[in-house]
Amino acid sequence: MTGLGKLFMIIGVIFVVVGFIMQFVHFGKLPGDIIIRKGNTTFYFPIMTSIVISILLSLIFFIYNKIK
């Protein structure tokens, strides 16, 4: 069970770091994100933000597996 506890601690640290970054950096408004406004309706599709988050998480899990 020590592996599971270690994983939860790492995930917790990741959430704290991402939360801290999101407080000071407007991370959801990257170039490449699609925003459509018509009348009272707004459609937001964060393509670039999703790609950046995916790359960061892939790197984090890659590093975690190398350490493990």
Image (cartoon, grey):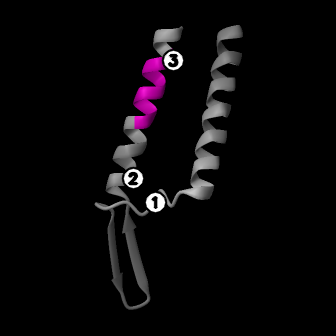
> Viewed as shown, does residue 8 lie left or right of 58?
right
Q: Which residue is mark 3?
A: 64
The reply to whether dot 2 and dot 1 touch (C-beta < 8 Å) is: yes
Crowd tier of the residue under label 3, counting other residues whose Cα lies within 10 Å: few below 14, some 14–19, many 20 or above? few
- Whether residue 1 appears in this view of the structure is no
Q: Residue 28 got which mark?
A: 1
Q: Image quadrant for the N terminus?
A: top right
Task: Report the Cα–Cα distance between label 3 and label 2.
Answer: 22 Å
The extreme left residue here reads 32
Q: Earlier in the sequence, mark 3 or mark 1?
A: 1
- In the depicted structure, whether residue 4 falls above or below residue 19: above
Q: Which residues are magenta?
A: 56-64
Picture residue at 50% right of the left edge, 61% below the top: 26
The three-letter amino acid code for the residue at tag 1 is: Gly
Element marked by disc 3: helix
User: On the image, numbered disc 2 is attached to which residue?
Assistant: 49
Q: Is residue 28 above or below residue 43?
A: above
Is residue 48 at all visible to an observer of this figure?
yes
Mark 2 or mark 3, which is nearer the start of the sequence?
Answer: 2
Circles 3, 2 touching at the beta carbon (< 8 Å): no
Q: Which residue is at the far bottom?
A: 39
Counting residues from the start of the chain, the first of labels 2 and 1 encountered is 1
What residue is rendered at 67% in x and 17% in y?
6
The amino acid at mark 2 is Thr
User: Do callouts 3 and 1 mark residues in contact (Cβ within 8 Å)?
Assistant: no
Dominant SS of magenta comes to helix
Residue type at tag 3: Tyr
Location of residue 32 by image quarter? bottom left
Q: Secondary structure at mark 1?
A: loop
Q: Is residue 23 magenta?
A: no
